[in-house]
Amino acid sequence: MIIRFSKYEGAGNDFVLFDAREGEANPPAEFIKALCDRHKGVGGDGMMILDMSPHKGVDFRMRFYNADGLEGTMCGNGGRCITLFAHQLGIGGRQKTFEGIDGVHRARILSADDNCGVVELGVIDVCKVELLDGGDYLLYDGSNHVVRFVEDVDAYDVDTVGRELRYDPRFDYLNGVNVNFVEVVGGGVFKIRTYERGVENETLACGTGAVASAIATRIHTGSNATEWKARARGGELSVRFEVEGESFRNIVLTGPARKVFSGKLDTSNFR
């Protein structure tokens, strides 16, 4: 079967997207793994399917799969990319509502042309931040994240330490975690590198990781700031939130999204 696809990236986090509004798509894990393979496939940190939500008042549904072929938890960079994808398909206005695996999200197109855009994405509330033995932080913002603060993130061994923490037995009940390494720059800015579960490697950026790290940085530094800049290897992301007691609400992740290219593929080549 010949099907159309589009390749998008948000701050270097890249995805293969499909429009499945007119049909049902339930791709097997082996197809997704082959598609995301950077040597023999299209290549990507994950794959997304846009289809219609069964719920009223929602513009579309986002179905996200990691490069390992398994359905993933919420992806912040993916959420911005699929919002721009929907916009370019003519779905909704500049403000859109879509269903993700963790619930309903609101997104807003701040700017867009034929290929590029800047998108605001609403993220679910964070009601609990756990300080672990050793000083790391654990929280859930649509995905489970550990945040570790380091002095020189550029020189840090993200692959080795990230893999160790991702598979740490303490997090087996969560099916593992994403691991963020953060260096506080100051002035509401931090540098971040992330080892992502499902990709099983460092990615150039992680949207929910930036959100988790902004919240952890506020707590770790004792700052009152509610707006943060996350400098990832693939680009800069902005995070803002409101604080109510120990909860973080009205969280918004802002950053770039870009269509890299579109094409057609023969599914028989990805078995």
Image: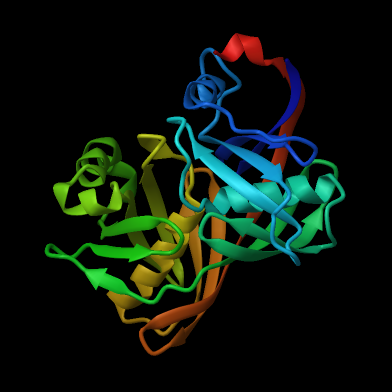
At x 45%, y 66%, the residue is 189
Identity of the residue furthest to the top in this view: 269
* On-image quarter of the C terminus: top right
Name the image quarter holding residue 268: top right
At x 75%, y 35%, the residue is 23
Q: How many marks?
A: 0
Apparent side of residue 271 relative to residue 264 in the rendered image (left or right): left
Apparent side of residue 8 relative to residue 155 in the rendered image (left or right): right
Identity of the residue furthest to the bottom in this view: 245
Let me know if residue 231 appears in the view.
yes
* On-image quarter of the N terminus: top right
Colour setup of the view: rainbow
Let me know if residue 11 appears in the view.
no
Position of residue 193 measured from the top left corner of the image (x, y, whole percent): 38, 48
Residue 28, placed above or below residue 163: above
User: Between residues 236 and 27, which one lies in front from this camera angle?
Assistant: 27
Position of residue 225 measured from the top left corner of the image (x, y, whole percent): 45, 81
At x 70%, y 54%, the residue is 53
Position of residue 142 measured from the top left corner of the image (x, y, whole percent): 46, 60
Residue 4, placed above or below residue 229: above
Residue 10, placed above or below residue 145: above
Apparent side of residue 4 relative to residue 169 in the rendered image (left or right): right
Residue 70, placed above or below residue 89: above
User: Between residues 187 and 66, which one lies in front from this camera angle?
Assistant: 66
Position of residue 218 measured from the top left corner of the image (x, y, whole percent): 37, 75
Apparent side of residue 212 relative to residue 34 in the rendered image (left or right): left
At x 85%, y 42%, the residue is 114
